[in-house]
Image (cartoon, rainbow, N blue to C red):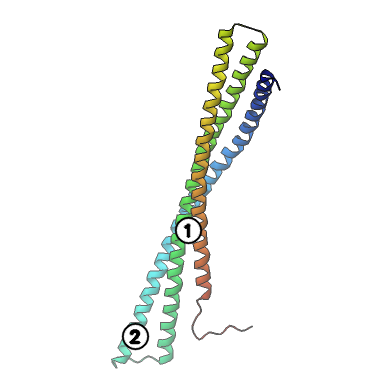
Amino acid sequence: MEKITLIEKQAQENFKLAQHEKEVLKKSKLMAKSEIQRAKARQILLKNEYNVSKLKLELAEGKKKLAEEKNKIKNGGILQFSDEELKMEQDYAIFHEKVSKIEKEKADINKKIASIEKEIAENRLKLTKEKMDVAKSREILGKKQLVYVKLVKSKTTDEKTSKAEKDYIKQKENLNKQKLDVLEKEKDIKKLENKLADYKKEISVKLSEREKIRHPGIILSD
C-alpha cells in the first residue's frame, strides 16, 4: 500500500476510533461517579457496623466477667447459684465473646474493603479523564495526518509538507506516550483489585469461622 494512502486510512480510522472512545468514556465517567457515591455510602454504613460490633464485643466481655464473678462468689460460699445456671451463663458469655470477636474482625475488614472500593472508583474516574485526553489526542492526530495527506496530494512546497509530516509524527509520539501512561494507571488499579480480592477472601474465612461456632450442649434436630 502506498505510504500516503496508508496514512489517509490511518487518519480516517483515528477519527472513527476517537469518536467511539468518547462515547464509551462518557458512560464510563457516569459509572465511576456512581461507584464513588456507592462506596461513600458503604463506608458510612460499615463504620456504623464496626461501632456496633465493637459494642457487642464489649458487652460479651462484660457478661463473661459477670459469669466469672458469680462463680467466684459461689465458690467463696457467699451466695448460692445453681451449677446449671452458672454453666449456662458462662457458656453463653463465651459463645457471644467468640462470635463478637469474629464480627468485629469482619467489620474491620469490611471497612478496608469499602476504602479500597472507593479508591478504585476514584482512580477509575481519573483514568476515564486521561482516556478522554487520549481520544482527543487521537482525533488531533487524525487531523494532522489529513493535513499532511492534502499537502502531498496538492504537491505543495516541500517545506510545508515536511513540517506537516513532522507535526503528525510528533503528535503520534505524544499519543503513544499518553497510552503508555494510561496502561500504567490501569496496572495500579489491577493491583488494588487484587488487594480487594484478598480482603474478600478474608471475609469468607471469617464467615466460615463463624459458622463453626455453636452453643455448647445444644443439639440441632434434623
The amino acid beneath tag 2 is Lys
* Residue 179: x %, y % from top left: 54, 33
Give the residue drawn at x 50%, y 71%. Answer: 209
Q: Is residue 169 visible?
A: yes
Residues under labels 2 and 1: Cα distance?
Answer: 37 Å
Discs 2/1, front: 1
Q: Quadrant of residue 85?
A: bottom left
* Residue 90: x %, y % from top left: 41, 83
The amino acid beneath tag 1 is Asn
Give the residue drawn at x 52%, y 56%. Answer: 197
Q: Quadrant of residue 63?
A: bottom left
Q: How many marks?
A: 2
Give the residue drawn at x 59%, y 39%. Answer: 28
Q: Is residue 12 left or right of residue 119?
A: right
Q: Quadrant of residue 162?
A: top right
* Residue 214: x %, y % from top left: 51, 79
In front of the other: 108 or 58 = 108
Label 2 sits on residue: 70
Q: Residues within 10 Å of mark 2 (few under 14, many from 20)?
A: some
* Residue 105: x %, y % from top left: 43, 65
82 versus 176 height, above or below? below
Q: Earlier in the sequence, mark 2 or mark 1?
A: 2
Q: Residues within 10 Å of mark 1 (few under 14, many from 20)?
A: many
125 versus 67 height, above or below? above
Label 1 sits on residue: 110
